[in-house]
Amino acid sequence: MNPKLKLAFFLMPLILFLLVAVFLFKGLFSDPTRLDSALVGREVPQFELPDLYQPDVIHDNRIIGQRPLLINVWATWCPTCYAEHTFLNQLLAEEQVYIIGLNYKDDSRGAAVRWLQNLGDPYAINLFDATGLLALDLGVYGAPETYVVDQHGVILYRHVGDLNERVWRREVGPIYYRAMRDAGLPIPEHRQELVL
Amino acid sequence: MIGELGHFALALAFAFSALLAFIPLIGVARGHGGQMALARPLTYGMFIFTLISFIALVWGFLANDFSIAYVANNSNTALPAIYRFTAVWGSHEGSFLLWMLVQASWAAALALFSNRLPLVFAARVLAVMGMIGVGFYLFMLLTSNPFERTIPLIPVDGRDLNPLLQDPGMIIHPPLLYMGYVGFSVAFAFAIAALLGGRLDSAWARWSRPWTIAAWVFLTLGIMVGSWWAYYELGWGGWWFWDPVENASFMPWLAGTALMHSLAVTEKRGTFKSWTVLLAIAAFSLSLLGTFLVRSGVLVSVHAFAADPTRGMFLLGFLGVVIAGSLLLYAIRAAKVQSHSRYDLFSREVLLLGNNVVLVTATVVVMIGTLLPLFFQQLGLGNISIGEPFFDEMFMWLTIPFAIILGLGPLTRWRRQGFSEIRNSLGLALLLAVVLGFALPWIFADVVHGLAALGLILALWVVFTTVAELRMRVASREHKLPALVKLGRSHWGMVLGHLGFAVMVIGIAMVQNYEVERTVRMGPGDTFEERGYVFSFEEMYEWQGPNFISDTATFRVTRTDGSRVGIIKSEKRFYTVTRQMQTQTGLQVNPFRDLYIALGEELEDGSWAVRIHIKPFVRWIWGGSILMAIGGIFSMTDKRYRLRRRLRDERKREHDAAEQEAKA
């Protein structure tokens, strides 16, 4: 091998690393959780879905539009949902946030129920979307995703990725609590700052 | 006051590392022995002040000093003392301080043993350790100061440690893992020093080998404890989740395993030189990459620390300088290395090359699986989730060639091996492996799963070829047993390491194919029967722990014929400060199976959702890892790495060489 060719050969690892580094760098600045939804500002699409626990109970749009709420899309095959789950439990326990769970294309009803039994159930209502019908209408990319819906059933915000303290404080929480304030509902003491 | 002392000590440690990073190198450039010799005391200084800083933080936790923000966020007066101690590394800042302590300890150990090395080389190695230190200390001081105060708003009590981390497994998991991660920085420093000196010879490989193996042993144990912890603490019954953070520790392990084997070739045969150096750089670079992934919030994971873009920025910058710098140095220097060794297609060299190819492929597979979701997002292709099925499938296919090569390798000679000489041993091993691989599940289980049989065949192939190899080594000796003992620790290390791998493969194959998982609704008085075991729910009681309330269920387990197996207690805990639920799995174990009970939710009528697993051979997975680690310990304590003897031999060889030159 001539020396130049040899040098080029040994430079390969460096070039590969630099390529990876470019992606890591961009990854730092793009919020991995941000994706726009065509539905922001519109009403939640029509749906009729069975309850996760009781297959014969069917929920429809009447469960939405009573009060501000979150719709959280999750599945047992999604590791990020596992990371998110503790935070959802905390939202329910400490702030009584009203969350509707949308179980998205799960392996089985049993797996989903087992998950909730094991990790706790932060959801006021559990929808079971085996074929991904509602998720398709909402334009769900993957789990987890969370939608903020106001008292009139209009989607205010869409968050892709997990909810955690940081996201809640900076992005999702303020929108939810502003809707709560507009609906004349109480806001917990320690979250007052979010609507200021 | 103590907090400020810790902070100040950390700054001093930084100062020492900064001096260490360049004074010895100036000494090398000028040929100034005194400046080179300064490397050692500077390293000790860095270590001592890091230790002081660490002790200051420990004191903050033990004394419940909630004026330190980190203590306030991760501890509580109700937390038991032992967990107040381990809470030191319960979150980002403190765990990084532990990381620094480990890094400084490795450097100090290196300095302590560096009198075996030529002064110039020792100065270079320690200087590289200093450079790595500079980056990390700066990172701590600028973005992750664990001593930040909450003054003047000092909280009355802390927010408590994450309940998941209040467990004995968590006491040892991070330190072991860090010992492994950071340990590869030693191999890295050796590689860089060798590149700087332009001398890539077998001496370099021999010096670096025990350190590399030591780091690998720690990493092996660290990953094992992590897997064991996840198994009983997360309450899922899984032992490996292919979570990005697990992958981050697995990548350096794979690269490190490849490095260990490649170092053997470089030491014994003086070949694969530039490849070995690249692996040494890769092993540590992957450790750094893992740190970046875990702590920058680029990926979402169960383990992820609080994400902060400035931290990510800093780490990425550091990563770029270290990795790009070393790879550039590598490109310039390694291109000039000549390799003269010759070997045939069927030789130990080629088989070890095969081992390296498989291990590096595995590393790349894990890396792709971990980073691909990120790439997809950046390229605007949408969000994807790569899960267990991808990794399981890939690793199944990789294990097959790996095990075959692993069986052949030790039986073959360096340079050239005639196939006919070992044909009989190989044939016998293959026959026994295949027959037993099918027979054992056929005799002991109701059904023979193809994958279980395959796993058993591969594992038994490794076992029987290892036995054949040992027989071959003593075949010509009259007294077999003393000859076996005389084989040397390094040899026994290899044998144990390979057997450990076989044991682990058996564990994985069995548990993946024969485990049983049932979720049942049970209340006190109910019984449930599965696979010849009867689980009776005896009673349910509530009790108060130091910082939690527990619902504990007692299960009596008997055989269907009525013989007693044992009592299993399974808990559901509610941690009152963090307001989190936590499952404490109940276990009844013997070497051949685990009975595993996790409590789910309480149902309306006072009964509970109970998850019962029967997991055959699951202990073998961890047992195999421990065996591998013991093998590593044997290898690194081999007498050829010991100081005096080595030095004497070397002097003699140099002397002989000089004499021969004189004669010529």
Image (spheres, rainbow, N blue to C red):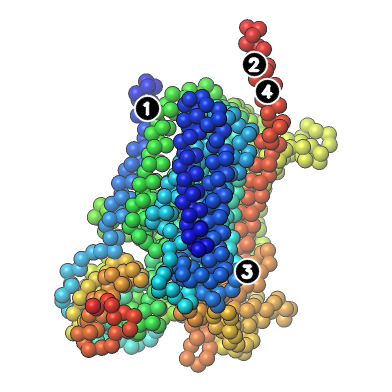
From the viewer's side, name the closer residue of B410 and B106: B106
Q: Quadrant of residue B553?
A: bottom right
Q: Is residue A34 above or below residue B141?
A: below
Q: How far is mark 3 from mark 1, CA to CA? A: 55 Å
Q: Nearer the viewer, mark 1 or mark 4?
A: 4
Q: How far is mark 4 from mark 2, CA to CA? A: 10 Å
How busy is the neighbourhood of tag 1: few (under 14 within 10 Å), some, or many (20 plus)? some
Q: Amino acid at mark 4?
A: Arg
**Residue B203 percent across, percent down from the top left:** 59, 29
Determine the chain carrying the residue at label 1. Answer: A
Q: Circle 2 sits on which residue?
A: B657
Q: Quadrant of residue B664?
A: top right
Q: Are marks 1 and 4 on the same chain?
A: no
Determine the chain carrying the residue at label 2. Answer: B
Q: Circle 4 sits on which residue?
A: B651
How busy is the neighbourhood of tag 4: few (under 14 within 10 Å), some, or many (20 plus)? few
**Secondary element type, mark 4:** helix
Q: Which mark is residue B594?
A: 3
Q: Amino acid at mark 2?
A: Ala
Q: Residue at x 54, y 57 (%)?
A: B54
Q: Residue at x 40, y 78 (%)?
A: A90
